[in-house]
Image (cartoon, rainbow, N blue to C red):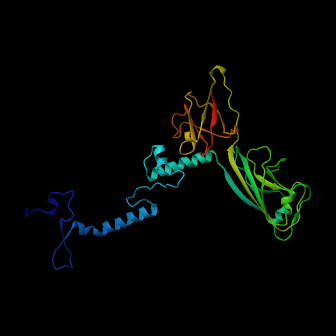
Amino acid sequence: MADERIYQWTNEPTPQDDVIIPIDHPDWSEGLSTTKAQLFADEVAARTAWDNAIIDGSGLDADGSFPPEPTSDYLQNIDFINAGLDVNTRNGLILLDRAISASVANNQLIVKFVISSAELLALNSTPVLKVIAPGIGNIFETCDCMARNNFASVPYVTAGTNGIYVRFESAADFIAHLDKVFCESAVDVVSKFPIERHDLPTNVGIEVYAPDGDLINGDGSITVLLRYAILPEPTPLPLPIKTCCVQPLADSFTNADLTGLGNLVINHGQNTTNIFLIVIDNTNTQFPVTFTSGDEGGADPNNYITVPIGGGIAGTWKWAIIAY
């Protein structure tokens, strides 16, 4: 033992915290000793502080676990349970990703724009583009239009019986009509305007236009709030070649049948992705929907479809599909 070097001693892979460690320094008058716990105390304290900072900064519980949010639409305990996922940060992101995907599938957006005084006074000769085109293969589906006449000191006078059209670029028809009474108001006024019957051109932006001529006088502005969705242009469904093999299916559903993400998952069992679907709401009105093949996780696309409904529906709804 006396002739052995330290590196020849038997290795202890898990030394206790109170194990004695010899230490020395040229400035010391004699060798000293310390313990494992003393040697690593600063490192342990620093790592504990870093861990606590990460836990606090990430909004985690004190033990580092992910806290479900009881007021959330997507991150409650039941949402993890319904999805068959453990409660942790990564799975919370998965739930949010699924919710975003479902929202995009039935996407609605809101745009607010202002028509300035200079634009109003030249709105017939120079229509103004306010919402850029949605991209190749896409269309705008307009849902609601509201506007505010921000009166300043002089009211506008329209050049004819019409006011201002919100329309697709250069279209003959219009999406909404901000009428003469609204445009010529001498006080601040907020109005909602009906969406008119209009064609839906592909990849065309939305502009404002005064059909009867430029507005006269006036020094205020108009703020427009437009709610719309960006949808893919509908394409014709392929016709079934063999009419003998077309399989119609139908059923009803209620809000209780929807998943936590507001989806209706239909097991049609027809071993095909060629599906035509319609959904009728509780007022016997067709509900516009899209769907994806497969269950909510994308599994078994030949026998399931997932339909984003949105949740919170009233009464009994119906669906019908033709599989071919």
**Compared to 250, does 203 lie above or below?**
below
The tally of labels here is: 0
Front in this rendered view, residue 59 or 36: 59
- Which residue is rendered at x = 83% and y = 65% of the image? 118
Q: Using residue 200 as the reference point, say whether residue 314 is left or right of it.
A: left
Where residue 177 appears, as percent x and y from the top left, is: 82, 53
Q: Using residue 218 as the reference point, say whether residue 203 is left or right of it.
A: left
Where residue 90 appears, as percent x and y from the top left, is: 46, 51
**Compared to 71, does 116 lie above or below?**
below
Where residue 86 appears, as percent x and y from the top left, is: 42, 47
Classify the position of the C terminus by image quarter. Answer: top right
Front in this rendered view, residue 234 or 28: 234
- Which residue is rendered at x = 41% and y = 65% of the image? 53
**Compared to 323, does 52 lie above or below?**
below
Q: Residue furthest right?
A: 160
Residue 114 occupies quadrant: bottom right
Where residue 199 appears, as percent x and y from the top left, is: 79, 43
- Which residue is rendered at x = 55% and y = 39% of the image? 257
Residue 324, can we see it? no
